Amino acid sequence: MADYGARLQCVPFARNASGIEIYGNANTWWVQAEGRYPRSNQPAPGSVFVIRGYNTDRRGHVAVVTHVDSSRLIRVDQANWLNNGEISVGVPVLDVSPNNDWSEIRVWHIPGNHWGGRTYRTQGFIHPFALHAALG
C-alpha cells in the first residue's frame, strides 16, 4: 500500500484506471452502468467496485479491483478514501456479507494498519467492457 500524495477524487481516478467511461458522482455510477457495462456481484481485476456512502446513499465511492485474493478478500486501488485526495494502492477489502455476495464490506484502515470498524454497503462491480460494441 502506498500513498503517492496526489490530490485526486475517486471518480476520475477510477475512470482513468479502469477505462470505464462514466462521469458524475460515485453514487450514480451503478445506475449509469446499466445497459452500458456488465454489472455483477463478483469481483474481477479491472472492475470498478461501487460502494455506498456510510449511513447515506447521497454519497458513494468507487475503487478499482486489482487482485482477487480469495472469495472473501480483494485488493483495490482508490483515491480519496481518507478524504485527503490521496491515492492508495493494494488496499485489502473484506466481504463480510452473510451470503458471500459482496453486499457488505470492511476496508483496511491504512493509518491504523488494521481492519476498519465500519461496515459499508455496496452496489457491486462494473466490468470494463462495453455491452454494445460496434460490429464490423
Image (cartoon, rainbow, N blue to C red):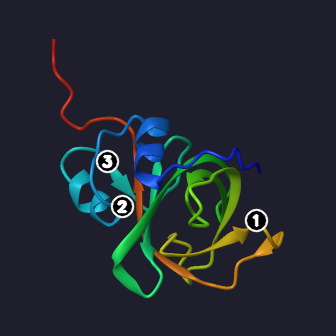
Q: Earlier in the sequence, mark 3 or mark 2?
A: 2
Picture residue at 56% right of the left edge, 66% below the top: 83
Picture residue at 27% right of the left edge, 54% below the top: 24
Q: Which residue is mark 3?
A: 38
Nearer the viewer's eye, disc 1 or disc 3? 1
Q: Which residue is mark 1?
A: 110
* Disc 2 crowd, CA 10 A, few/some/many (<14, 14-19, 20+): many
**Image: 2 above or below 18:** below
Q: CA distance from mark 3 to mark 2?
A: 17 Å
Picture residue at 56% right of the left edge, 42% below the top: 45
Q: CA distance from mark 1 to mark 3?
A: 30 Å
Query: Residue 62: x and y, percent?
Result: 45, 58
* Disc 3 crowd, CA 10 A, few/some/many (<14, 14-19, 20+): some
Q: Which residue is mark 2?
A: 26
Q: Could you say whether the residue bearing mark 2 is in a helix, strand or loop? A: helix
Q: CA distance from mark 1 to mark 2?
A: 21 Å
Quarter assignment of residue 15: top left
Q: Earlier in the sequence, mark 1 or mark 3?
A: 3
Q: Could you say whether the residue bearing mark 3 is in a helix, strand or loop? A: loop
- Name the residue furthest bottom: 55
Q: Nearer the viewer, residue 16 or 85?
A: 85
Residue 55 as seen in the image, left or right of residue 131: right
Amino acid type at circle 3 is Pro
